[in-house]
Amino acid sequence: MARRRTGRFLLYLIAIILGIIVLIPFLWAVSQSFTPANEIFSIPIHVIPVHPTLENYNVLFFKLGDVEIVRWFINSLFVSTAVTVLILLFDSMAAYALSRLRFPGRMVVFFAFISTMLIPAQVTFIPLYVEMQKLGFLDSYNALIWPYLANAFYVFLLRQFFQGIPRDLDEAAIVDGAGAFAIFWRVILPNTKSALAAVGILSFTAVWNDLFWPIVTINSVDLRTLPMGLTIMNLEYGGTPGPGLVMASAVMAFLPVLIVYTIFQRSIVEGISLTGLGGR
Amino acid sequence: MAMVQPALPAQPRRAAWKWRQVRGLLTAVLFLAPYTVFFLAFLVWPIFYGLFISLHKWSLFPGQNQPFVGLDNYRTLLSDQEWWTALQNTVEFTVITVILTFVVALGAAMLVSANLKGQTLFRLIYFAPVVLSVAVVGLVWTSMWNTDIGLVNNLLNRVNLPSVEWLSSVNLVIPSLSITTAWWGFGLPMIIFLAGLRGIPPSIYDAAKVDGAGAWAMFLRITLPLLRPTILFVLVTQIIAQFQIFGQSLILTNGGPGTASMTVILYLYQVAWKFYNLGYAATIAFALAVIMGVVTAIQFLFLGREVEY
């Protein structure tokens, strides 16, 4: 019995230590963001600022001409939302056709879709960029929205979920005189809400977090997404005015995300174990 | 794949039957069209167009002539020292990161499922870094690893250990990126492991306890074998994900010191957007695709049994 209790104690200890390791970088960033520049560079460093200051946030929001962190946040929100809404609509329509409609070549279309999942996205970076160039999409929201809609993974995922809905439900609707669109809208979608939520979370976070594509297609300061804006800002201001400012921008970027995550953590975590796959 | 159709009249008129077919096809086209437009324009076309570009000398700037050079870019690749360095670094990073992530994720999953008080809170905290973007992770950890004013060395100094050049030493830079990445991402496979662990019936453990099995024996003989499909899934998806490392090396080290943390995607990025050589960058992308295609094919081979088409 005593051995069992030490075992439990050890488990708690490990769990708490791991929790602290996970939390430390967050706390470090918060602490640094309130530290004045002269303290940051004084050695030995202070883990907690002696004279906490709001100066870093003041500079971040009001003093830098080429830093528009609020605008970048709104850009990221707009782009991620637009892509997610369009993916949920277009991809579930395609998945519905593949799961429920009868037409010649259905399996061919399906395999054409899923075979592209074997090809890593990087292959399309260069040609897509040239395509954006030719379409005149570079440095505009067009480049940040339309290419994300081509991902076949979500169609595949939704089709798998749709396959799981009993066909009795369709038939009942058909008897009631429902057509294909009515079945899609009133039978399939309402019965796959958790799957739709999961796909929505995956696509939203994938677009929200993407760094490569915005960095290569966007130039204007006011069109940057948040990750891109932060990355460039770090290159430009990492030395002076210094790490405190950069940490303030990091805190401003992760705080809203962590709040949303804490509120919706149950459905986020369930969504991810439902799909079995992460966004990255 | 037979579908149950509503009962048809015994002898449908031919015209009605034909109309039904046409209408069915039209409906399908209508439902498929919106996605398929983007699928063709931004996925299928670029794949072939990329192959075309890789066979040309192609500059980032439009308007310059783009002569056909055949397999020249591919020949260059084979003797390009920096490409091989990048590939080697990427493999090294992938191996370390996957092992680290795997161990921590499985450990965390077992902790969370061990019926501790506050397990929801533990899960909440462990998963939190996953929701960050790579930019935030990069900024925070640049500061964490800083040789002079970073937290890690500060903590080492407090217990009388010397400072370490985490990001500017050739040998440590990749492990440092791996630790950063494992911190960022272990929550994701943890969730998948949790789902796997929940699928193991508790009665098996009870029976083993009756037989006098210890915790370690139960882990080796019950947990690991029964988790096999989940383990396989996590390993393969992790390998593919980590192989695509870009943001961490861009933000934390920009490939340095020297080329010690240059990775394949970062190299592709530099070739295209720093040296303006799109033809060669497209070639790098195809080489990467071949390598990852092999890995992904293995994934489908192993997981194919579970996936219902």
Image: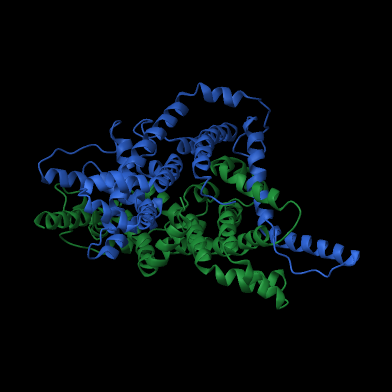
Residue B25 seen by the camera = yes
Q: Residue at point 27% right, 47% down?
A: B219
Question: Chain A in the picture: what colour?
Answer: green
Which color scheme is applied?
by chain
For this view, does B9 lie left or right of residue B143?
right
- According to the colouring, which chain is blue? B
In this orientation, which residue lies closer to the viewer: A179 or B148?
A: A179
> Which quadrant holds residue B228?
top left
User: x%, y% of residue A82?
Assistant: 56, 63
In this orientation, which residue lies closer to the viewer: A140 or B283?
A: B283
Q: Where is A200 relative to A39, above or below?
A: below
Q: Where is A178 relative to B26, above or below?
A: below
Q: Where is A100 relative to B277, above or below?
A: below
Image quadrant in which the N terminus of chain B is located: bottom right
Q: Residue at point 50% right, 45% down?
A: B303
User: x%, y% of residue A161?
Assistant: 55, 61
Residue A240 seen by the camera = no
Q: Residue at point 36% right, 30% down?
A: B258
Labels in figure, total: 0
User: x%, y% of residue B138?
Assistant: 35, 48
Q: Residue at point 58% right, 26% down?
A: B74
For this view, does B14 lie left or right of residue B103?
right
For this view, does A39 lie left or right of residue A191?
left
User: x%, y% of residue B291?
Assistant: 51, 33
For this view, does A210 lie left or right of residue B34?
left
